[in-house]
Image (cartoon, helix red, strand yellow):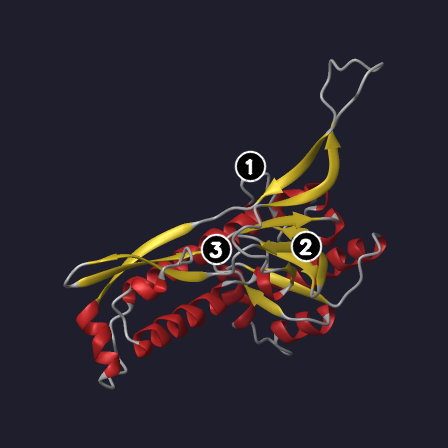
Amino acid sequence: MDILKQSLAPLSDEAWQEIKSAAKQILSSHLSARRFASISGPMGWDYAAVPTGRLDIPGGQDKKGVVYGIHKVQPLIEPRISFKLNIWELDNLARGARDADLDQLEEAAVKLAEFEEKTVYYGIKNASVTGLKDVNSSEKLQLPGSIEGLLSTVSEGITKMMDASVTGPWTLVVSPALWKQISSHFKGYPLKLQLEKLLGGPVIMGHFIEEAFLVPSAAEDINLVIGQDISIGYESHNEKEVRLFLTESFTLRVNDPASVIMIG
């Protein structure tokens, strides 16, 4: 039996199908980094760490004898969030219902997406993950005082990337507040279309960020390493409710800091 234990859940095939479909819909609309980062995997549950290609040579060794090094690795992170669903409500799906209450599932999916996104953009120090915000802090650009100045700022960022031999097309990931300003700016030619023409790629919203990030649209040097992709597992149940969980395992590696410019 695998770690997800789905076969133990008292759920119909229709219920599982609806649960997975609802989770996928929420996750796909909230995971912005997967739209530009290169994806390695999924490698499976037993893939626990990424080799960095470097050795740590402990001090105090007798250089006249055998000298050893320890391989450096970057461990994967495995988040998990539990949620409960009403069994009777899920049984209604087999009866043809199309409005089952999946609110707790949807809330859990948003929280898992937030965890992955914040890990990518802001990092987790004790997991050896440096977020996009900090990998290239010396090239940080300031948001302009008015939305009209954003085009010039993005152009400056693209110039910096080209000077560092980072090629386009590019993607601009923006906060919800900035997305609202861009989408509602219609003086003359819409600002969003002007930006996308300059970028050669899309402007997308990052639901859980407060800044903007300029990255290549196919960012080979921003690598999201996935052990187990996002999955739903079974924990327990009683006569009324089933307790499930959402989980994954992943880490982030940025091989070229010049491939990220934060605007904020």
* Residue 126 placement (x, y as % from top left): 53, 35
Residue type of the residue flagged with mark 3: Glu
Element type at marker 1? helix
Q: What residue did someone put label 3 on?
A: 248
Measured Cα–Cα span from mark 1 to mark 2: 17 Å
Quick one: which residue is furthest to the left in this view? 239
Q: Earlier in the sequence, mark 1 or mark 2?
A: 1
Measured Cα–Cα span from mark 1 to mark 3: 19 Å
Mark 1 Cα-neighbour bin, 10 Å: few <14, some 14–19, many ≥20: few
Q: What residue did someone put label 1 on?
A: 125
In front: label 1 or label 3: 3
* Residue 231 placement (x, y as % from top left): 44, 62
* Residue 177 placement (x, y as % from top left): 49, 60
Element type at marker 2? strand
Identity of the residue drawn at 34% across and 72% down = 16
Q: What residue did someone put label 2 on?
A: 222
- Quadrant containing the N terminus is bottom left
**Front position in the image: 108 or 65:** 65
* Mark 2 in CB contact with mark 3 (< 8 angstroms): no
In front: label 2 or label 3: 3
Identity of the residue drawn at 46% across and 66% down = 27
Identity of the residue drawn at 40% across and 55% down = 111
Quick one: which residue is furthest to the front in this view? 1
* Mark 1 in CB contact with mark 2 (< 8 angstroms): no
